[in-house]
Amino acid sequence: MALIVQKYGGTSMGSPERIKNVARRVAKWKAQGHQVVVVVSAMSGETNRLIALAKEIQDYPDPRELDVIMSTGEQVTIGLLSMALNEIGVPAKSYCGWQVRVTTDSSHTKARIQSIDDAAMRADLSAGRVVVVAGFQGIDENGSITTLGRGGSDTSAVAMAAALGADECQIYTDVDGVYTTDPRVVPEARRLKTITFEEMIEMASLGSKVLQIRSVEFAGKYKVRLRVLSSFEDEGEGTLITFEEDENMEKAVVAGIAFDRNEARINVKGVPDKPGIAYQILGPIADANIEVDMIIQNVGENGTTDFSFTVPRGEFQRTLAILRDVQTHIGAGKIDADDKVAKVSIVGVGMRSHCGIASTMFRTLAEEGINIQMISTSEIKVSVLIDEKYLELAVRVLHKVFGLDQVQA
């Protein structure tokens, strides 16, 4: 008998019939003798609906009250799933985040989990019940309801698994695992049987939407065995996210290709080449809580240099507005900007022990006439910024040149 934590997203909980399907799936695991904790999201589209309601009252909703509103979506689905399980003879009990006592900090709409009281869940599991918990939410030390940010139910599930010492945390999504890249762009993309936590963190941070990055980081930190499965298929082993590189990892130099269209490039020209200039440019942007990704500062010439960086596309105009003040203050030249760019990344732990991976990537793009605007690297990834119009072509040719369409032995 194993203790399993399962997470079902908004698509899986999108209608009464789909909730009944989830109940039947959970019942199968229970019938095999396993203890099961289920973490669920709100019905698909419900959180957006609740946010829209709040914005009809306030243009910029009060974060504390917005959390109160958004948390109701999961309260509906835990009740419905518990009813569906009880209806088919599987004893079940639902809990909101504050009832389980998922304690978080007070950063409303983007809180972080600090601790989980597992006593009530363990008592129910020992009594033979399935425990159904609302994902995405918790409570701070002041007793205020908090939410964990977009994709927070993944983090809730992993945190539950860590607190309970679960044998496995299963994330059920609308795909049947982690693929070498998005099959909608490359039909030949393969489902990976395994991927390391390092690779999955890179893939998630670079644009792969299968798992929320915080949940992968949490799983890696607490050594939670994590598996991605399809909520619409009864068969299949999905993708297991592993702690260590397996014996085939040497062969799979590149595990996958991630991409992100949510990019905008900004180049500040004629920047004074002196100490502290990078801080003077990026400091005000950081103070505005805008995340900067790729950064390049050219070698200085004649006392000036060019400073380039990328920001999320949704923050493009706000960043430009901040830079206009900075531009005058530091005496920089003109600002060149482009929000029609995209980032393409190759990821693989095997890159540590193989040379020439980056050059293969650059040569392949050059042969297709794709210009590289910026480059960023780490030990297990290489990212390039290119014109958005070449994104899908770049992903397809890189997927092929690195043999990701071939089944690994």
Image (cartoon, helix red, strand yellow):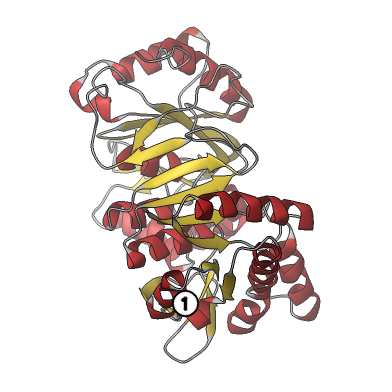
Count of labels in the image: 1
Residue furthest top in the image: 367
Question: With respect to residue 79, does 64 lie above or below?
Answer: below
Q: In the rendered image, which quarter is residue 409 located in?
A: top left
Residue furthest left in the image: 353
Image coordinates for residue 387, horizontal then vertical, percent: 57, 28
Image coordinates for residue 113, horizontal then vertical, percent: 40, 71
Which one is in front, 249 or 118? 118
Which one is in front, 162 or 64? 162
- One can see residue 331 in this view: no
Q: Is residue 74 left or right of residue 129?
A: right
* Residue at 33% from the left image edge and 59% from the top image edge: 279
Report which residue position mark 1 lands on. Answer: 107
Image coordinates for residue 302, horizontal then vertical, percent: 29, 38
* Residue at 33% from the left image edge and 53% from the top image edge: 224
Image coordinates for residue 45, horizontal then vertical, percent: 74, 58
* Residue at 53% from the left image edge and 12% from the top image edge: 369
- One can see residue 259 in this view: yes
Q: In the rendered image, which quarter is residue 125 located in?
A: bottom left
The kind of residue on which mark 1 rests is Ser
Q: Is residue 286 left or right of residue 29?
A: left
Question: With respect to residue 78, does 143 lie above or below?
Answer: below
Which one is in front, 393 or 6? 6
Secondary structure at numbered mark 1? loop
